[in-house]
Image (cartoon, rainbow, N blue to C red):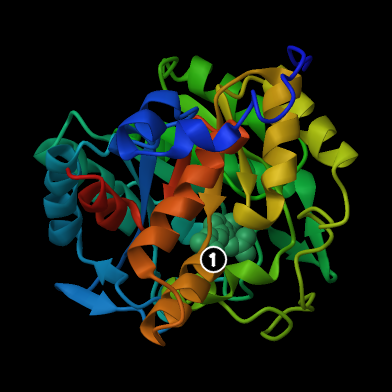
Amino acid sequence: MTFAPLAPYPALRLRRLRQADWVRRLVRETQLTPADLIWSAVVHEGEGRVPVPSMPGVERWSVAEAAKAAKEAKALGIPAIAIFPHIDGAAKDPEGSAAGDPEGLVCRTVRAMKEAAPEVGVMCDVALDPFTEHGHDGVIEGGRILNDATIERLVEQGLVQAQAGCDILAPSDMMDGRISALRSALEAAGLQDTMIMSYAAKYASAFYGPYREAIGSGKLGSGSVANPADKKTYQMDPSNSEEALREVALDISEGADMVMVKPGLPYLDIIQRVVEAFRLPTFAFQVSGEYAMLMAAAQNGWLDHDRAVLETLGAFKRAGCAGVITYFAPVAARLMGA
Ligand code: PBG
């Protein structure tokens, strides 16, 4: 970036362009709209809606409620919904077998949503953790998360999701090579239009805590198999950013259409670097812990909820994101006048 020479003060008074709302709007550099949002949501096997205690305002939806929400998204101008399943303990096993069930919760939800509102995109997480009793995103052997054996399971899972009508597969597992495996399986199955948004730079973060409660995730570090207590052998080290660029480059070369950085706000520097380096649609995931943090402060009267929601989401646009995956999507769309 090179700047034109600056006039010296008082010829230059930067406050001139801030003096009224109309001129602030006129010179605004970035704009958040409902079209920038992907609504992150949790679904369950039960009836109706069940609140998630650590995420005030977020509820687990039944399949029927998810279909209603798809219509709501359409009315609010929200382009897509990302669904995450809460799986009953009895349906889990060490390999996460239920992930590949074409009649499972995720596939039934996708079909119901696409029937209710075909104009709204549906995105599915490709990862085993909702389905494994140990809560890891992969198959474990001797306390190690197996890369290639996990990919085989992810391909089965991605294929049934795509066949059910899922528009965007979003692999969040961080196994090496999963994008090319998914892409070639989709091509071979005649599903060449299914999009892939890879969780390319996903960090081993403390900010996923509330999500694990929301989906009833298995407890890391316990269970019937030797079970590592964290995801650090597959998710990225929060200290690294060069590595994030390598992860993104790899996923693009393997056929990802879009990439994601996760979590969001603590990783704005990564988002900006990815956008500058690769110039492809880049998304941020404002994760459960970011949501919970903001809601807790707002509920205590310590933050202005509405302003803080729009300011954090706007920060992702300023950093260069095409859009944001967020639990605030409907709230934010309404705040924007939808
Ligand atoms: C699992 C997955 C996680 C999230 C999305 N997919 C948790 C994890 O990796 O442990 C987190 C979402 C959130 O915190 O909102 N593959």
Q: Amino acid at mark 1?
A: Glu
Name the residue located 61 percent from the left edge and 54 percent from the top edge.
265
Q: Quadrant of the N terminus?
A: top right
Dot 1: few (<14), some (14–19), or many (≥20) neighbours within 10 Å?
A: many
Give the labeled residue for mark 1.
Answer: 290
Check mark 1 vs ligand 1: CB closer than 8 Å? yes or no. Answer: yes
Residue 264, image x, y percentages: 60, 52
Vertically, is 286 above or below 314?
A: below
Residue 126, image x, y percentages: 52, 46
Q: Is residue 220 visible?
A: yes
The image quadrant that residue 70 belongs to is top left
Which image quarter has ligand 1?
bottom right
The image quadrant that residue 146 belongs to is bottom right
Residue 133, image x, y percentages: 57, 75
Of 212 and 4, which appears nearest the observer? 4
Tally of numbered discs = 1
